[in-house]
Amino acid sequence: MIIFGCITKYTPHDIRPYVESIEQSGFKGGKVMLVYDVPTETIEYLKSKGWELYGGDLQQHIILQRFRDAYKLLQTYEDEIVIWTDVKDVIFQKDPTKWLEKNMKGELLVFSECVTFKDDDWAVVNAGTSFPMEWEWLQNKVSYCAGTIVGKGYALKDLFIEIYRWSLTTANPNQLSDQAAFNVLINLNHFKENIQFVKQEEGFVTQLGTVLIKKEHFGDKLLEPTPIYSEEKFFNQEGDEFVIVHQYDRHPQIKELIYQKYK
């Protein structure tokens, strides 16, 4: 099992909550990072924490190129379970190993953002203008987050190269369309039959951008409840601690508490 991330230009300060939370979780698997144009101090920091680093030159926007480069790198990890996450806005509250050993059934696990596409103003523009043909049905689907995906290396590899290629052929090149492409693909038959669609309340990931930051905006259109926040940790309604917290940095007070915790 490996945790796999990708960064550019970040300093140790920027990624400390991510790195230190994984360290403190007790995770014993591999840790792999794609790095582009990062300071030497960041490289030294990651190496000191046991990360394998793979460097590259940015030729496209990192949001797009990361999927191409991750596809190539995943050829080395085809037989591993890979936990793919964003870095700057993610922390691990617990070791992911136990949850996955107990609950992973599909070759790919995708994690809900707890809102339907048509109810998210940003998604209406992003996905609706990027893939107008698919939008006819995508608008009625639940949104899943491209910044937190788990899968067998061989399955994740195939998904990533298709995200990359679909993102090159959108109807609106002004939109970064990885999120839209990801959601189109996971609903196509050749991927869907191997995908486990995971709700927030199952306890692996909470995507705070929708369920906390914009909870007043979405109101009763949210499909799942806002997590319980207690003693600087996030829990589902059953009192189970989430393994991963995503998008915490969109809440200034919580961001400050987390940065203080892992400084």
Image: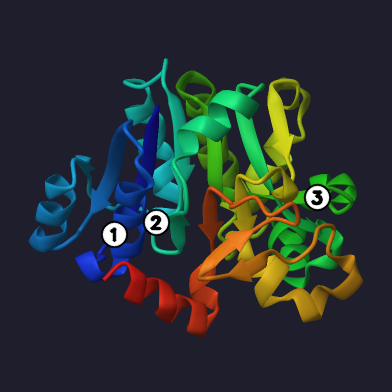
Q: Amino acid at mark 3?
A: Val
What colour scheme was applied to this rendering of the protein?
rainbow
Q: Amino acid at mark 2?
A: Val
Closer-to-camera residue (94/182): 94
Residue found at x 44% / y 57%? 91
Q: Is residue 172 above or below residue 181?
A: below
Residue found at x 64% / y 28%? 103
State how far apart marks 1 and 3 are (Cα).
Answer: 30 Å
Disc nearest the viewer among 1 and 2: 2
Q: Position of residue 37 (x, y in %)?
A: 20, 59
Residue found at x 34% / y 63%? 17
Judge the density around disc 2: few (<14), some (14-19), many (≥20) Cα neighbours within 10 Å.
Answer: many
Pointer 3 and pointer 2: residues touching (CB < 8 Å)? no
Disc 1 is placed on an element classified as strand
Q: Which residue is mark 3?
A: 142
Disc 3 is placed on an element classified as strand
Q: Which residue is mark 2?
A: 87
Q: Which residue is mark 1?
A: 8
Residue found at x 36% / y 21%? 75
Do we see residue 159 in this rendering?
no
- Residue 224 lies left or right of residue 39; in this view the side is right
The quadrant of the picture occupied by the C terminus is: bottom left
